[in-house]
């Protein structure tokens, strides 16, 4: 347990903050992307028929789905651990499906969004 050492906690906290940000934002970005593609397809039907544009849309969609599912599953399957207490960051007994990953550890209350000593 590395409780309290800000320099040691800075790296894992930064990684967990980024993972939490991707887990929380990627579904909304994906939803916006699907909506934008739908609007563009409705307004300009010839635009999406281009094979390069269709392949680019498909690649971006697959990348967003992959980022969203991997980051969410890392919290749900207890892979993402708290930098301070080394316990799973989200207690799955309290949260069945973490559609929104909270900023505090369920075990020790460590806030990953606070500015800690050792951060830039
Ligand atoms: Zn913790």
Image: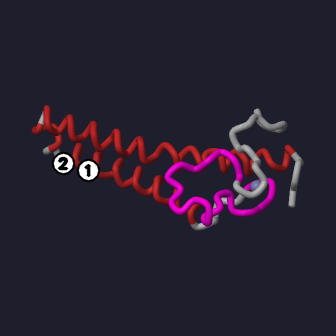
Q: Which residue is mark 1?
A: 55
User: Looking at the image, which residue is at 61% across and 45% down?
Assistant: 18
Provide residue 24's location: percent of width, then percent of height: 52, 46
Farthest left residue?
A: 46
Circle 2 is placed at which residue position? 51
Name the colour scheme.
secondary structure
Residue 26 magenta-drawn? no
Q: Secondary structure at mark 2?
A: helix
Q: Are marks 2 and 1 in contact (CB under 8 Å)?
A: yes
Q: Mark on residue 104?
A: none
Q: Nearer the viewer, residue 9 or 77?
A: 77
Q: Quadrant of ligand 1?
A: bottom right
Q: Position of residue 48 (x, y in %)?
A: 17, 42
Q: Quadrant of the N terminus?
A: bottom right
| Magenta span | 82-105
Q: Residues within 10 Å of mark 2 (few under 14, many from 20)?
A: few
Locate the C terminus by quadrant.
top right
Based on the picture, tell me whether residue 93 belongs to the magenta stretch. Answer: yes
Quarter holding residue 65 = bottom left
Q: Give me the C-alpha separation between circle 2 and circle 1.
A: 6 Å
Please say if 92 is above or below 109: below
> Which secondary structure is most common in the magenta stretch?
loop
């Amino acid at each position: 347990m590395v409780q309290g050492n800000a320099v040691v906690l800075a790296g894992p906290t930064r990684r967990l903050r980024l993972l939490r940000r991707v887990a929380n934002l990627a579904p909304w970005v994906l939803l916006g992307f699907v909506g934008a593609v739908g609007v563009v397809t409705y307004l300009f039907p010839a635009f999406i028929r281009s094979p390069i544009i269709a392949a680019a849309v498909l690649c971006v969609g697959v990348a967003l789905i992959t980022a969203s599912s991997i980051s969410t599953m890392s919290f749900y399957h207890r892979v993402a651990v708290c930098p301070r207490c080394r316990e799973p960051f989200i207690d799955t007994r309290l949260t069945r499906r973490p559609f929104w990953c909270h900023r505090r550890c369920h075990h020790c209350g460590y806030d990953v969004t606070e500015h800690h000593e050792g951060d830039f």
